[in-house]
Image (spheres, helix red, strand yellow):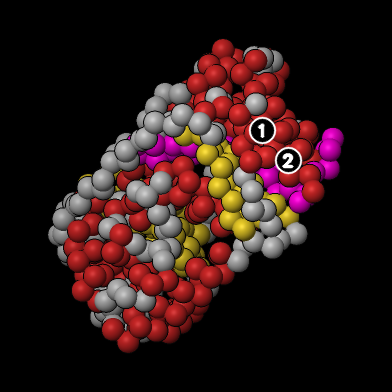
Amino acid sequence: MYQTKLLKSGLTLITINLPHLDSVTSLVSVAAGSRYETKKVNGISHFLEHMFFKGSRKYPTAEEIANLVDGIGAINNAATDKEVTFYWIKSASKHLKLSSDILSSMLKESLLGEEEIEREKGVIVEELRMYRDNPARYVWDLYEQLQFGNQPLGWDIGGEEKIITSVNRDDFINYMDSLYSPKNMALVYVGKLPSNIEKIANDLFLDLPQRSHQAFKSYKKTKQTKPRVRIHYKKTDQANLILGVEAYKRKDPKRYAARLLGVILGEGMSSRLFIQIRERRGLAYHVSASHNSYIDAGSFTSYAGLKLEKVLEGLEVIKAELERMVAEKVTPDELKKAKEMERGRIALRSESTNFLAEHFGIKYILDNELETFEEYLKKIDSVTPEEIQDVARDLFKNEKYNLQIIGPFKETQKFEKILKS
């Protein structure tokens, strides 16, 4: 499905040729994100992502870059997470070379103009405020602060307003020099590719600066002896709630069973939480559960947006469903459905060049290896009901629960009582 090649610059090239398409996604992923930051510059990974679109030596203004992208009917964007940042352009295949040239110029010769930095500070601050005014989104940031604490994994990807307004050009240059090395990146092309794709990549990305590769500080897990509850008081018409526990890192073999546990509990309209919370009780519109991994840590979370007057009942139902996974093995039919759902969702997503580019670019950067979807699905198919129950028993213990709520509540005692019972 994919091919890899180490380019002369030290950059890894990953290609997936889909000749039946007329489009291509060009993507560069970098092992850089908020967990690589110090508190002094928390948020700079995301801020730098913005600055790469503000002009380079070859394309000196944001307007020029935007006109070029719009002029070929392409789409471009980027994203920053805690462990990875990626930049992409999706275009007609005939414009692949121009897309590559724009990406390479952004990464190797960004201007980082001081006036642009000062101007963009206002944009970043407004973006932070926008997200924090959205409880259904902001509750996830708060949950990770609760679970991971005052460590880089627990910090907000966007940073704090007072930090954002204080960073300067030297901070950006120092940060880039510590991480933006070609040996710390992957270049991914997915779609209809020309036969000389390797030459194009070598020519345009040959002179990427040879920078260093700074390691992040490992996550230090603290012993948890009782459930933790934190409320972010906000006058809302709905309570946004996440109940979670620490779980498995990216290469832990238990992650496959944890993935299926999340599917059974909270993915799709036939999942256990959806049936119990929404269909039978009408307590929420959206409810879900999932397992998420970082390189050296992980979390299993259940989310619901609940009626204010029913938030305690909703929490009780979520906890009861988690505990039922501990007490009872899933049935063969339910497990088979979960496996088929995972297979089907991958098949649907695989029709997107963006999904494929992001998936392989991120996986290579984080794991230094790739696997086909069939290899992944073989491991999913091998999961047994006993393994899912073992994972549930390992995860769902009263003393391990972390509960983050956004809503018009001030006291934690009633929530703590439910988690301890």
Q: Are marks 2 and 1 in contact (CB under 8 Å)?
A: yes
Q: Residue at x 40, y 54 (%)?
A: 155
How far apart are the two marked residues, 2 and 1, measured between alpha carbons? 8 Å
Residue at the spot of label 1: 418
Q: Residue at x 20, y 58 (%)?
A: 178
Instruction: Indicate the amino acid at tag 1.
Output: Ile
Horizontal arrangement in the rendering, residue 152 relative to residue 214 (left or right): right
Position above or below: 30 against 396: below
- How many numbered discs, if any? 2
- Percent position of residue 50, x then y: 40, 71
Residue 381, image quadrant? top right
Circle 2 crowding by C-alpha within 10 Å: few under 14, some 14–19, many from 20: some
Indicate whether residue 296 is drawn in magenta. Answer: yes
Position above or below: 314 against 256: below
Q: Main secondary structure of the magenta part?
A: strand
Indicate whether residue 137 is drawn in magenta. Answer: no
From where the camera sits, is residue 99 visible?
no
Residue at the spot of label 2: 312
Work out whether mark 2 precedes mark 1 in sequence or the reverse, and give the earlier one: 2
Residue 317, image quadrant? top right
- Percent position of residue 144, x then y: 47, 47
Q: Residue at x 76, y 38 (%)?
A: 313
- Percent position of residue 277, x then y: 77, 38
Instruction: Indicate the amino acid at tag 2.
Output: Leu
Q: Residue at x 32, y 38 (%)?
A: 220
- Percent position of residue 10, x then y: 18, 51
Position above or below: 72 against 335: below
Instruction: Please identify the quadrant where the N terminus is shown.
Output: top left
Circle 1 crowding by C-alpha within 10 Å: few under 14, some 14–19, many from 20: some
Q: Which segment is the magenta one?
A: 279-308
